[in-house]
Image: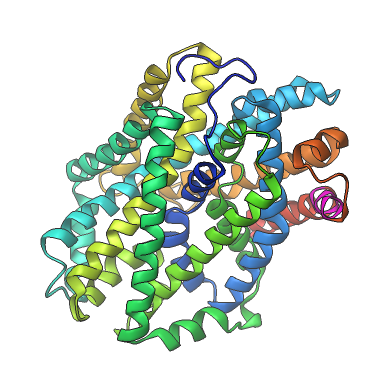
Amino acid sequence: MHGPSAKGSGPAWTSRFAFLMASIGFAVGLGNIWRFPYVTGENGGGAFVLVYLLCVFAIGVPILIAELLIGRRGKMSPPNSMREVAIESGGRKEWQFVGLMNLLAAFLIMVTYCVVAGWVLEYLFKALVTGFSGVDGEMAIQTFDNMLGDARGMLFWTLLSLVLTGSIIYAGVQDGIERAVKVLMPALFSLMITLVIYNMVVGGFGEAIQYMFFADFSKITGTVMLAAIGQAFFSIGVAMGGMMTFGAYLPKTISIPRSVVIIIVADTLVALMAGLVIFPAVFNNGLDPAGGPGLIFKILPVAFAQMPGGHVVSVLFFLLLSVAAITSMVGLTEPLTHWLEEHQGFSRHKSTLLVLGSIAVLSVISILGYNYLAAFNLGGKDINGVVDYFSNQILLPIGGLLIAIFAGWFVDRHVSVEELDMEDNTLFKLWYLLIRFVVPPAVFVVFVLGVSS
C-alpha cells in the first residue's frame, strides 16, 4: 500500500461497490449540490438542464469511459498511464503531458475548492449551534459577508477541510478511501432523499419542478452551452485525474461501461435532487433562484429560519454538503498523491503531507481574494474567478478534448475492445463513433464559443 507502485502492483479496490462509491463520491460534490442549482438559476432553468443532460450523456460518458480505460490499462498515475498506453499503442510518450495537465487542473481546483468546503463546515457548525433561527435576508447576507471578511476564521475551516481529506488519503486506498466512502455515500443519499421528501410536504415543490424541467429554448445561447459543458465536466469529474487514478486501481473483472452508467446516473440524480432540495425552499420564501455562488449561504439560511423543523433541516443539509465536499476532495487529491509516490518514490504518508501542505499554503491566496486582495482584478475577474476560469473553462475542456482524441485516434482499437470487454459490438461502435467524431468537435466548438464570448 505504501511507497511507489510498480506497474500492475499498486493498490486495488476490493469490490465493485467500493469503486462505485469512491467514483460517485468524487463525481458527486459541491459541483452538484452547490454549483448546479445556481448555474441552473443563472442560465434559464429547464433549458439549461436539458442542454446539461445532453452534454453529460453525449460528451461526459464517452470521456469518462476513456479515462477509466486508460487508467486501468496503464495502472499508474495519469501522466504515466497516458505514457504507458501511448507506447503500447505505438505512440509517443509525450502524451503524458495530458495527464500532467489533468493533475494541474485538480491542484488548482483544490486550492479554491478547499476554501468553499471550509465555508460548508463553518455553516454546518452554525446550523448545529443556532439552526439559523430568526435569520432574515439582511442578516444572512451580513453573516456571509462577515465570514468572507474574516480571513483567520476562513483559514481555520479551510485547514479543517484539508485535515479531514488528508486523514482519509493518508490511510491508503483500502483502509482510507474505501472505508470512508462505504459509510459516507449511503449517508449522503439517505440525507438527500429525506430532504426531498420534506420539501414535498412543506411546499414550493411544484414551482421547483416547473422551473427545473420546463425549458425556455430562447435562453439557449453559446454561453449557456459552455456553462452546461463546464458544469458537466466539473460535475462528473472528467479531466481532473481522479477517474483515471481510480481506474488504475480497478480489477479486470469489473465492467467499465456498466460502472460508468451507474456513476453518471447517480451523479445526475444527485444534481437534479439538489435542485429539488434547494429550489422549493427558495420559491416557498419568495427568494431569487439565480442567487449566484452565494445561493446556499445567503438564501437558504433565511428559508431554514422560516420553515417548520428548520434547525434539523439546516443541520442535515450542511452535513450532506460536507460529505459531498470531502469525498470530492479525496478524488482531487488522490491522483496528486499517487503521482508523487510514483514520480519521487515517496511514501504515501509523505506524499499526502506534501500535496495537502502545498494546497494549504496556496489556499491562503484564495482566502485573501475574498477580503484583503478583493480589489485585485484581471480581465474583470477577481483572484478566485481567474483560477476558476483557467481550471474549469480552459484546462478541463482542453484536457477532455485531448483525452478523447487520444482514446479515439491514438489508442490501439484492440486495447479499447479488450479493456471495455465489448467484443467490438454495437455499443462499442457507438462509443467509438462518439469519442472520435462527436466529442472532439463538440468540445472544441463550445470551448471556442466560451473563450470568445
229 vs 89, nearest the viewer = 89
Say which residue appears at 42% left-offset and 27% top-offset. Answer: 172
Return the x and y of residue 112 as percentages of the image width and height.
Answer: 39, 44
Say which residue appears at 20% left-offset and 68% top-offset. Answer: 312
Q: Residue furthest top?
A: 345
Say which residue appears at 76% left-offset and 37% top-offset. Answer: 419
Return the x and y of residue 182 as percentages of the image width and height.
Answer: 41, 46
Say which residue appears at 42% left-offset and 55% top-offset. Answer: 30
Q: Which residues are magenta?
A: 427-435
- Answer whether residue 336 is magenta in the image: no
Horizontal side of 443 relative to 131 (left or right) equals right
- Answer whether residue 431 is magenta in the image: yes
Asked if 98 appears above or below 126 in the picture, the reply is: above
Asked if 302 appears above or below 169 in the picture, the reply is: below
446 vs 123, nearest the viewer = 123
Return the x and y of residue 193 as percentages of the image width and height.
Answer: 39, 69
